[in-house]
Image (cartoon, rainbow, N blue to C red):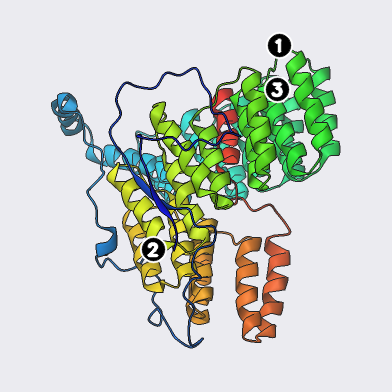
Amino acid sequence: MATVFQLSLSSSFLPASLHLHTTTKPSASQPLRKLLISSASSPSPPTTLNSPRKKHWKIGEYPGLTESSIPQFSSTNNRKRTPIKNIKKKLDKKNNAKGWANTVTEALSEAIDKKQWARALQVFEMLKSQPFYHPKEGTYMKLIVLLGRSGQPGQACQLFDEMLEEGLEPTTELYTALLGACCRSNLIDKAFSILEQMKSLSFCQPDVYTYSILIKACVDARRFELVGSLYDEMAERLITPNTVTQNIVLSGYGKAGKYEEMENILAKMLETTTCEPDVWTMNTIVSLFGNEGKIEMMEKWYEKFRDFGIEPETRTFNILIGAYGKKRMYDKMSSVMEYMRKLSFPWTTSTYNNVIEAFSDSGDAKHMDYAFEQMRAEGMKADTKTFCCLIRGYANAGLFHKVIGCVQLAGRLEVPENTSFFNAVIYACARADDLMEMERVFKRMKDKMCRPDGTTYLIMMDAYRKVGMSDKVYDLEKEMEMTVMSGKDSEGLNEDDDVVNEGLLLESG
């Protein structure tokens, strides 16, 4: 019988091999919070289907289209409230404003915030037709960044051309955003052509952020020979790489298994005062070994960075939690979480996502549900990754009725549906041997203009192979060559990649 313990602040489970020392002083008193975690090394096997013909969805039903209530996910409303002191002022301002103008601009802002790129472009066209419209650099910047994040480099380039036609002068920041949109979809040649355009314009010269984003694209594509040439070009232009640039290259070398080159970069960072290692460097290295399951190396480098005087942050602890969770080292995972509480480091959405993911991989629906309910009880907002983990977890446990409820809840909460989200639903359909529904979800994915990635095709091809549908496998292989091999999966980025890309653009702007 699995041993169960409760995570609280009354005891310590810190392993001797990982000293999470810090200079931050713990608060005098903390409320008691408990998280039920199983420390069993091997969970019970998930429930499997007795018949491959059993259907768990009605014909034509895509989870997320209905509005039926889901008792297992009921919770309080987490919408933000307007500060009382500003209500009258805002109401007066709204009453005096033109209703149509106010509605269109708010709709555009809402679409951008929710990462709904197609709707954002539609509303933007409506806005441009209004007599009060005046082109603004900031609006175009936000839209280009959104299109880049959504894997729509073609739309970003078209929008950039429209901006020039409207008479707006291009800037280094706008060009950098456009270059970043191409880099996210692995359009490296196009990104280099944009770089050449920038160099030909005296008022749009590339800066360290431009080169850093391009270097990241080359590193992700394992084209390290281009990284060297970009470094040489930066030196000729007297542009000094910053810590972010070096962290990007560090991560690339590490992912490629070039540990000697990685340590050389780190040694150079320690020798200079212009790009010294920081907590991002620490997170990069710790995450690298954690993702590869090399726990001892992860802990070793954690201690090294602490010896360098670098203090961990919430993201650092989340990386440790995720690494321990993937190896099902629940005792160490709980120790880090408890330590965060003692030192007043908040548990974030990423913290809970890592815990939910750990139980999702093992099909432990009980503890996954417990973690999700506690997450919502603490007012933490679930994101796309949260629901991806939940959907895959319920599928691994054979609880396909909960998959439907989970996707419906994601729809009501307006959680963005990206490639990873659709992959999780397709995975659940495949586990349920419901190939018809899997095909419908795949079609909806395309209708939503969400590009499939390698994972999408592999899941579907495996499902077809199990039933001997070799013609379907062949068609998907051809389609995969056309869609995936032609460009990088734009939505398969992890949290750190996403933050690095947006951080570079924000800093440059």
The Cα atoms of the two marked residues, 3 and 1, are separated by: 25 Å
Element class at badge 1: loop
The residue positioned 70% from the left and 27% from the top of the image is 245
- The residue identified by callout 1 is 273
For the residue carrying disc 1, how many other residues have a C-alpha within 10 Å: few (<14), some (14-19), or many (20+)?
Answer: few
Residue 71, image x, y percentages: 24, 63
Give the mark nearest the N terminus, 3 or 2.
3
Amino acid carrying label 3: it is Gln
Q: Of circles 2 and 1, which is in front? A: 1
Q: Is residue 21 left or right of residue 64?
A: right
Amino acid carrying label 1: it is Thr
The residue positioned 16% from the left and 24% from the top of the image is 85
Circles 2 and 1: CB atoms closer than 8 Å: no
On screen, residue 123 above or below 482: above
Residue 338, image x, y percentages: 42, 36
User: What label does residue 205 carry, if any?
Assistant: 3
Q: Of circles 3 and 1, which is in front? A: 1
Q: Of circles 3 and 2, which is in front? A: 2
On screen, residue 312 above or below 126: above
